[in-house]
Amino acid sequence: MSTTKKIERSYQLAQERYAELGVDTEKALGQLARIPISIHCWQGDDVGGFENAGQDLGGGLAVTGNYPGKARTSLELRSDFEKVLSLVPGNHRLNLHACYAEMEGAKVDRDALSADQFRQWIAWAKKLKIGMDFNQTYFAHAKVIGGLTLTCADPAIREFWIQHGIRCREIGAEIGKALGKTCMTNLWIPDGMKDTPADRKGPRERLTEALDAIFKKKIDKKYNVDSVEPKLFGIGAESYTPGSHDFYLGYAASRQTLITLDAGHYHPTEGIADKISSALCFLPEIGLHVSRGVRWDSDHVVTLTDELQAIAQEIIWGGYVDRIHIGLDYFDASINRVAAWVIGSRNMAKALLMALLAPIDELREFEAAGDYTSRLALMEDAKVLPFGPVWDYYCQQKGVPVGDAWLAEVKRHEKDVLSKRQ
């Protein structure tokens, strides 16, 4: 029996088992195919960008490892990203940072960026028929003064970064308009204090004013939606972060903008899954940056953890698919960067499929009846349902490698392409 037939036969058996619990696997696969994951560009080049080659990131960011084959140019990065798309089932998006601007010999500072510096990215995405999301870049720049940007006491520094934010929103709108797919433009700043501050109020008041200035211009949400991203702390900002979760949640709710929940931006034992339904009680949409923090916001490759499954369950079971922008955010230079991309992206898709295959209707019936014993029993039994054959079938149907066969493709790419980069 051929491998294709074996996969189909295994899928049929799994399909029958799920049907016994009222789960339609074909419906689940159809739903999964319509959920895009915004895959982050910065895994491919260690968050280097193309403004200033070789510049230290700074701003509370750190990439560990020196695995050979890092993308050195935008062409190489795009080529690697295309390889990723060929190995991950579904139709996904590119998540791009402003520091990946292509200057083409004419240096443009961040307060003067326009869609001109991203036209090649846009043309490439249009050719691939994928959407794009965008991120403002407030790190690795001479005008990050003492680790501060939008909260800096110097009005000239604040104005520079305000203009950067304004320009980025305009770029996001141009991206959305050109691709015919709404762009989410996300704002995260590294601002904070290493030790206990004497003034907690001032920086937050300045940040509020700066954000209001950035978001003052009305932009059609058909093309661009804005999001603000909180953080617990960063390197060199361990004691105080103006842009905390409480601050940004209040700001987003009062301004009806999005908030981006990053899985690595909270206490190590704190998950973001429970925050999703809370935020969506008051916000029209939210963004997610799915990461894996180990002891701190260390941005490890996303694995199929309980937390990832909880995030996916909240998205699917809560009926929030159309209100959540799912993105990835990690960087690991200790392993093959393309493999890191693929592992995390496929795991996010796996978690979504697992949530789609859960017997949620029966679980809800038990809960509504107050039968929590049966609810717990079914939740636990559902963990060993034959998910694997359904995932393999989905990969086969979407024309991507099944099982670990994708790794051979990455190894070939490393041998033929990455190994030739110095």
Image (spheres, rainbow, N blue to C red):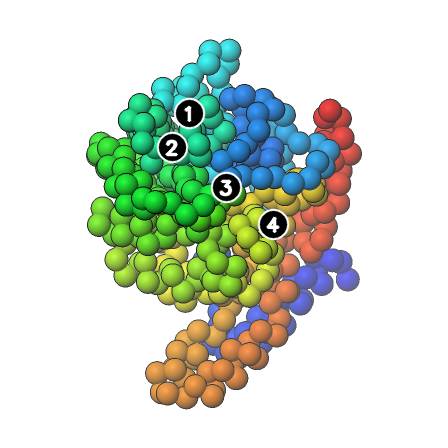
Q: Residue at x 43, y 42 (%)?
A: 193
Amino acid tagged 1: Lys
> Where does label 3 land, which residue?
236
> Where does label 2 land, which residue?
149
Quarter occupied by the N terminus: bottom right
Q: Residue at x 60, y 33 (%)?
A: 45
Mark 3 and mark 1: Cα distance apart in space: 17 Å
Asked if one can make out residue 307 in the rendered structure from this viewpoint, the answer is yes
Nearer to the camera, 37 or 202 = 202
Check residue 245 in the rendering and tell me which mark sits there, or answer none. none
Other-residue count near label 3 (Cα within 10 Å), few / some / many at <14 / 14–19 / ≥20: some
Residue 160 screen position, x and y as percent:
34, 24
Asked which secondary structure carries label 1, the reply is loop
Residue most toward the front? 198
Q: Residue at x 34, y 45 (%)?
A: 198
Asked which secondary structure carries label 2, the reply is loop
Left or right of 121? Residue 350 is right
Mark 1 and mark 2: Cα distance apart in space: 7 Å
Between discs 3 and 4, the one toward the N terminus: 3
Q: Please state the total of marks drawn on the protein image.
A: 4
Check residue 143 in the rendering and tell me which mark sits there, or answer none. 1
Amino acid tagged 2: Thr
Q: Are marks 1 and 2 in contact (CB under 8 Å)?
A: yes
Which callout, 3 or 1, points to the residue nearer the camera?
3
Between discs 1 and 2, the one toward the N terminus: 1
Mark 4 and mark 2: Cα distance apart in space: 28 Å
Residue 276 screen position, x and y as percent:
38, 60
Asked which secondary structure carries label 4, the reply is loop
